[in-house]
């Protein structure tokens, strides 16, 4: 079987999560570092998004599906509990992060800085301020969630944490979100501790080209 390929730029939070999962399962992989809508992404993802994945004859799109495959197709400690309650809790956190938290704090807030679309390339203050005004409850929710054990589910790292950590990493780098995370001791400690984990520290993305 050829080596698994993760297709997508390392700066993508969804690509990063797939790479962390590979690291945790000790799965060797090649990173095909392309931006959305590159031919390699369009060949697999129906909307040309990243990540996509290729493993021999198996192709997948959507990070959740890729994370599932990495967790189930390879030996090693499971990245999600196999009991119904623990497994469902992992799904719950991935779902709320991908459908509610990511759209606000990555697609609106972060992209207001990174891809502002303003004539001079300066941050889109209206977009950033509108998003920032709604972000506090999201961080408060996550702070409460990790308070008991230092993880989102149970007392070990799962795909729920792997899916969330890349987003929080970016949030610590920007002024408004950085202040919000810093003011949440459980969440700030969670990010700091996970960033020291080898599979995460070894895959911290480079800056976007030209930034
Ligand atoms: N639900 C998808 C989201 C993937 C996604 O939005 N990726 C971004 C990069 S982080 C992308 O490809 N954006 C380009 C676009 O939306 O056209 C997943 O979990 O894989």
Image (cartoon, helix red, strand yellow):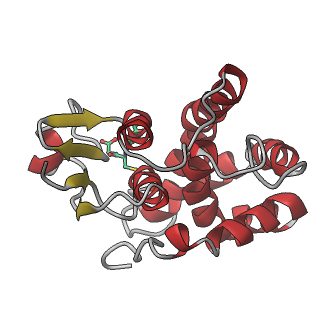
Which residue is outermost to the front? Answer: 75
Can you say whether 11 is above or below 151 in the image?
Answer: below
User: Is residue 125 among what the camera can see?
Assistant: no
Can you say whether 97 is above or below 106 in the image?
Answer: above
Q: Does 114 sit left or right of 140 as displayed?
A: left
Q: Residue at x 25, y 50 (%)?
A: 36
Place of residue 117 in the rendered image (x, y in percent of width and height, measured from the top left): 38, 56
Q: Residue at x 61, y 50 (%)?
A: 164
User: Nearest the camera: 93 or 175?
Assistant: 93
User: Nearest the camera: 83 or 109?
Assistant: 83
Q: Does 170 sit left or right of 142 as displayed?
A: left
Place of residue 22 in the rendered image (x, y in percent of width and height, measured from the top left): 40, 56
Q: Residue at x 80, y 58 (%)?
A: 187
Place of residue 89 in the rendered image (x, y in percent of width and height, measured from the top left): 69, 29
Place of residue 195 in the rendered image (x, y in percent of width and height, measured from the top left): 63, 71
Q: Quadrant of residue 207?
A: bottom left
Q: Does 170 sit left or right of 15 as displayed?
A: right
Can you say whether 7 is above or below 65 in the image?
Answer: below
Q: Residue at x 35, y 39 (%)?
A: 73
Q: How many marks?
A: 0
Q: Quadrant of residue 32?
A: bottom left
Which quarter holds ligand 1?
A: top left
Task: For the C terminus, give its image quadrant.
Answer: bottom left
Which residue is outermost to the top? Answer: 84
User: Nearest the camera: 101 or 144?
Assistant: 144
User: Is residue 177 among what the camera can see?
Assistant: yes
């Amino acid at each position: 079987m050829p080596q698994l390929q993760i297709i997508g730029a390392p700066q993508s939070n969804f690509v990063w999560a797939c790479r962390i999962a590979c690291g945790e399962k000790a799965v060797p992989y090649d990173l095909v570092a392309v931006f959305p809508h590159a031919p390699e992404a369009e060949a697999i993802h129906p909307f040309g998004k990243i990540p996509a994945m290729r493993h021999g004859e198996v192709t997948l799109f959507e990070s959740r599906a890729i994370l599932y495959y990495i967790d189930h197709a390879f030996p090693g400690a499971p990245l999600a509990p196999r009991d119904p309650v623990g497994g469902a809790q992992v799904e719950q956190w991935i779902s709320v992060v991908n459908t509610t938290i990511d759209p606000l704090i990555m697609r609106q807030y972060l992209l207001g800085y990174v891809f502002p679309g303003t004539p001079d390339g300066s941050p889109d203050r209206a977009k950033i301020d509108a998003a920032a005004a709604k972000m506090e409850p999201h961080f408060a929710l996550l702070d409460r969630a990790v308070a008991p054990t230092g993880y989102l589910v149970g007392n070990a790292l799962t795909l729920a944490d792997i899916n969330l950590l890349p987003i929080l990493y970016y949030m610590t780098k920007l002024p408004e979100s950085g202040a919000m995370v810093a003011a949440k001791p459980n969440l700030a400690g969670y990010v700091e501790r996970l960033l020291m984990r080898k599979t995460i520290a070894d895959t911290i993305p480079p800056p976007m080209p030209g930034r």
